[in-house]
Every structure is written in C-alpha cells, then in structure tokens.
Amino acid sequence: MNATFRDYVLLKVSRNKFMQQLGFTLTEINAGEVKGELVISETHEQQNGFVHGGVISALCDMACGFAAYSMVPNGVQVFTVELKVSYLRPGMGEKILARGWVLKPGKRFHFCESELYVVREGKEILIAKASSTMGVVEDKVNDKYGG
C-alpha cells in the first residue's frame, strides 16, 4: 500500500477544477474509502428545485474515483470506465454527504461503490447509490510532474 496515499489523494483533489467549481470537499480520506460533502446552493438545482442528476452523478463518480486513488502508488492514474447511478429520492436539503469505497481493488481495475445522503432537517436521507469500475494505469507522461 502507498504510505503517502492521503497526500496523493489531496494532490489529485487540488487538480480537480470541476470538483472545486461544484464546491465538493473531502472530509475524510482512508485507505480504500473517502467521505465528502457539498453544501447545496441554487446553482446545483434543476428546474424543479432538486439537485441536478448530473451533480449527483458527478459526486458519486468523484467519491469512487478518490477512493480508488487511495489504493494506488504515486504516479498511477485512475479513470472512470463505467458508472451506474441509481437515483433513489430527490436531492432536497441543506447539504449532500458522499461516501465512496473500493469494493475490490485490482491491478488494472478497481470496483467501487458510493452512496449519497442529503441532510434535511437534521436527518440523513439516502438519495443515490452507484457502482463504478475504475481503470488503473501507470502514466509516464504525468509522472514527471509528481503524478
């Protein structure tokens, strides 16, 4: 295992401009698991006032992806090969809590899952579940820039 996995995940987070634009932040990084949150604003909503499905899908994807990054050596890249999201309830509330984990790590693929909860009136309500396949590749080009 990568002894500096937290630093590597944080490096990848710092380079993820879309994540920054959304306002999604990681709150916990462990080997094979991450947690994060997004404070919901009007910019995240679709025409009916729910969090847009694209935002939910992106959060599921990022939770899986950063969990996968926590399981690879520095210089190894992770990318989404497949993502299946089940939307269980409308996203309405103050914030979204995301949890992603590696179900089965592998040499070429990591199989990951994520769950999203909305916080509404102090309660956590499950709104989405996802399963993902993350490709794992050694990237010689980006490796010279510190992964």
Image (cartoon, rainbow, N blue to C red):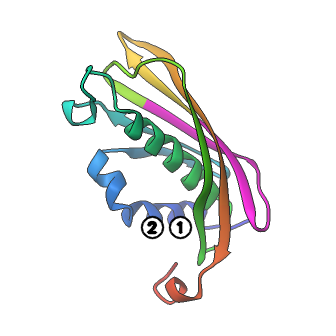
Q: Is residue 47 magenta?
A: no
Between the residue at mark 2 and the residue at mark 1, the CA separation in whole angstroms equals 5 Å
Q: Indicate whether 36 appears above or below 71.
A: above
Q: Indicate whether 77 appears above or below 40.
A: below
Q: Which percent across, then down, holds residue 145?
A: 46, 85
Q: Indicate whether 50 appears above or below 16.
A: above
Q: Which percent across, then down, holds residue 58?
A: 44, 45
The residue where tag 2 is placed is: 11
Locate the N terminus and report the quarter of the image it occupies. bottom right
Q: Which percent across, then down, holds residue 108?
A: 75, 67
Q: Indicate whether 15 appears above or below 36.
A: below
The kind of residue on which mark 1 rests is: Tyr
Q: Residue at x 52, y 88 (%)?
A: 141
Q: Residue at x 49, y 35 (%)?
A: 98
Q: Are marks 2 and 1 in contact (CB under 8 Å)?
A: yes
Q: Is residue 101 magenta?
A: yes
Mark 2, Cα crowd under 10 Å, few <14 / some 14-19 / many 20+, is some
Numbered disc 2: secondary structure? helix
Q: Residue at x 23, y 31 (%)?
A: 41
Q: Residue at x 36, y 44 (%)?
A: 24
Q: Which percent across, then down, holds residue 26?
A: 44, 46
Identify the image quadrant of residue 85.
top right
The kind of residue on which mark 2 rests is: Leu
The magenta stretch is 97-114
Which residue reaches farthest left?
42
- Count all numbered tags in the image, as a single digit: 2
The residue where tag 1 is placed is: 8
